[in-house]
Amino acid sequence: MWYYNNVRIIVQDFQSSDEQIIARHNPIGAGTVLHYFGSDDQIVNLNALVVGTGDYETLRAMKDDQAEYALQSPWFQNTNYVLKALKFKGMLTNCQTLRPDLPIDAPVFELDIELYRDE
């Protein structure tokens, strides 16, 4: 089970990246010079399904409040992330069976979500 700020998301794909900040300089007549400026915090990209307009609207509201929320999953337990970006796509379904606690005609949304870890 995956949750972001207690909103149930059904994750289909998960990617994460950790990067360093490195500038490359190429002076005339010399080799490449690297300057290290530290590292970025972790970035998590999820492709997930969300059922119901309530969860859809809750996630959309989180994009503007600049707050950190816990991502709970089999790999992350209460690790806080800031919501960077959401891309939603409505799925054409007649009947949803992903969330038995919601009506069978509840809308299903596919989303791409980008989260930044703030350490």
Image: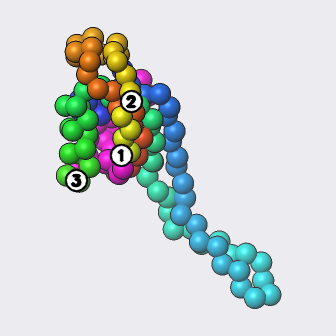
Of labels 1 and 2, the one closer to you: 2
The answer to if 80 sits in the magenta stretch is yes
Determine which residue is flagged by label 3: 64
Residue 5 has which mark? none
Of the numbered discs 3 and 1, the one sitting upstream in the chain is 3
In which image quadrant can residue 74 be found? top left
The residue drawn where x is 36% and y is 34% is 90
State yes or no: discs 3 and 1 in contact (Cβ < 8 Å): no
In which image quadrant can residue 23 be found? bottom right
The percent coordinates of residue 95 (x first, y second) are 33, 15
Question: At label 3, which amino acid type do we have?
Answer: Asp
The magenta span reads 67-86
Question: At label 1, which amino acid type do we have?
Answer: Leu
Determine which residue is flagged by label 1: 86
Q: In which quarter of the image is the N terminus?
A: top left
Of the numbered discs 1 and 2, the one sitting upstream in the chain is 1
The percent coordinates of residue 51 (x first, y second) are 29, 25
The residue drawn where x is 25% and y is 44% is 60
Residue 91 has which mark? 2
In which image quadrant can residue 30 be found? bottom right
Secondary structure beneath dot 3 equals: loop
Q: Is residue 84 above or below residue 50?
A: below
The answer to if 25 sits in the magenta stretch is no
Of labels 3 and 2, the one closer to you: 2
Q: Is residue 72 visible?
A: no
